[in-house]
Amino acid sequence: FGSSATFFAKELQIEKTASPKPHPEYESLVFGRTFSDHMLEVDWTAAGGWGAPRIVPYHNLSISPASSSLHYALQCFEGLKAYVDDQNQIRLFRPEKNMERMISSCARLSLPTFDGKELLESLKKLLVLEKSWIPKARGYSLYIRPTCISTDTTLGVGSPQAAKLFIILSPVGPYYKEGFNPVRLFADDKNVRACVGGTGGYKIGGNYGGTIMPQKQAASKGFAQVLWLYGDRQYVSEVGTMNFFVLWKNEKGERELVTAPLDDGTILPGVVRDSILALARKEHADEMKVSERLFTIADLTKAIDEGRVEECFGAGTAAIVSPVKGIHFAGKDYIVPIDEKLNAGKFTSLLANKIMDIQYGRKPSPWSVVVQE
Ligand code: COI
């Protein structure tokens, strides 16, 4: 951090809404369609640095149609959730990881960086004000969407001279209402989500827009999500908008939990990804080896054919874990085992429960941060 331009100019200012909205029936929530009464906003200019952060009524933005965010995808975002525990306290799950990642996404796009602790403190104040919007049941939460956009009014392709950081809040229900819904994946050997030297390791809108058409094509063939591959050797990278894990007996006969590594910059450093790796290394080291390494779709399909794959799942903030029951690749269907009673693999289901126990404050953990009111 260092430069004063990375700090907000003044104390947080709060303007409350005069017309609070009615709260929805939480059972009927559709992901990302309902928003709370207030939002956080803070503006930046190259000349003046950050202004004062403001909590204001939720409103439409007014920006120039020439804003370079609208033309050159100068936009990055985060996704995290707030929970209410059994003692009626607000909790966040490893929020400093989202702040760190957003700073790195901003830096990658030449958007201004900021002080992560300061933004987190402002977010906490917003959450205290919006507490009634956090649904109380397990599986329900308030999805938090911090976003930074260029507001520079120029069609020139260049470093933004003006930007806006905002946070909006959306109450969300459990990803799978009737329990897990294991999905079939389409391993796409034509479209690539991210390549070495690209921006796959950052949470920027530009990484997501291009995935929608291939996802739609996969859906039209009856597959819920795309399994993304890249490179001449067709390395397995991510699934849909999530990180991807396999629990298998590898070629050496070792029981191994494996996910693609972060070091070539193609993989999003997911908070749930990191949490699963840490939990597996700490609590399951005697049952499995835990690896972040490259593996190919040929390795995966061969292992499925040979009966060596125990479980496959996606991991992300929205669904926590998403079980996989099949993979379609090069004209062939590969069946991934599922525990019929759990509707997921045993380890997949165990992980979901362990992580939720921490998020909802049922199991003490330094990862769960209580927001003081
Ligand atoms: C996640 O799986 O947590 C996401 O990144 C979803 C989000 C893009 C809606």
Image (cartoon, rainbow, N blue to C red):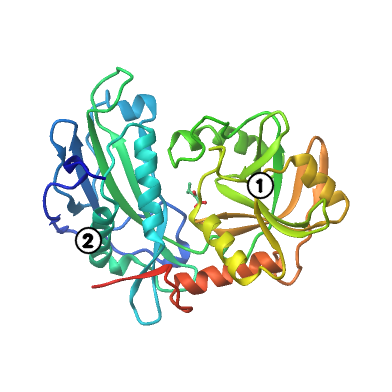
Instruction: Tell whether 283 sits left or right of 185.
Output: left
* Quadrant in the picture for residue 103: top left
Quadrant of the snapshot with the C terminus: bottom left
Residue at 67 percent across and 38 percent down: it is: 218
Residue at 41 percent across and 55 percent down: it is: 97
Question: Mark 1 highlights which residue?
Answer: 293
* Quadrant in the picture for residue 353: bottom right
Q: Position of residue 24 (x, y in %)?
A: 37, 63
Question: Mark 2 highlights which residue?
Answer: 20
Q: Nearer the viewer, mark 2 or mark 1?
A: 1
- Nearest the camera: 98 or 23? 98
Q: Quick check: 254 above or below 232?
A: below
Amino acid type, residue under disc 1 in the picture = Arg
Q: Position of residue 157 (x, y in %)?
A: 33, 19
Callout 2 environment at 10 Å: few (<14), some (14 to 19), or many (20+)?
few
Q: Position of residue 359 (x, y in %)?
A: 45, 69
Q: Which numbered circle lies on residue 318?
A: none
Query: Mark 2 and mark 1: span between their CA atoms?
Result: 49 Å
Q: Residue furthest top?
A: 156
Instruction: Tell whether 9 sits left or right of 275.
Output: left
Q: Position of residue 7 (x, y in %)?
A: 19, 47
Q: Residue furthest right?
A: 306
- Nearest the camera: 11 or 151? 11
Quadrant of the snapshot with the N terminus: top left
Residue at 31 percent across and 52 percent down: it is: 168
* Residue 178 visible: no
Q: Quick check: 318 above or below 359?
A: above
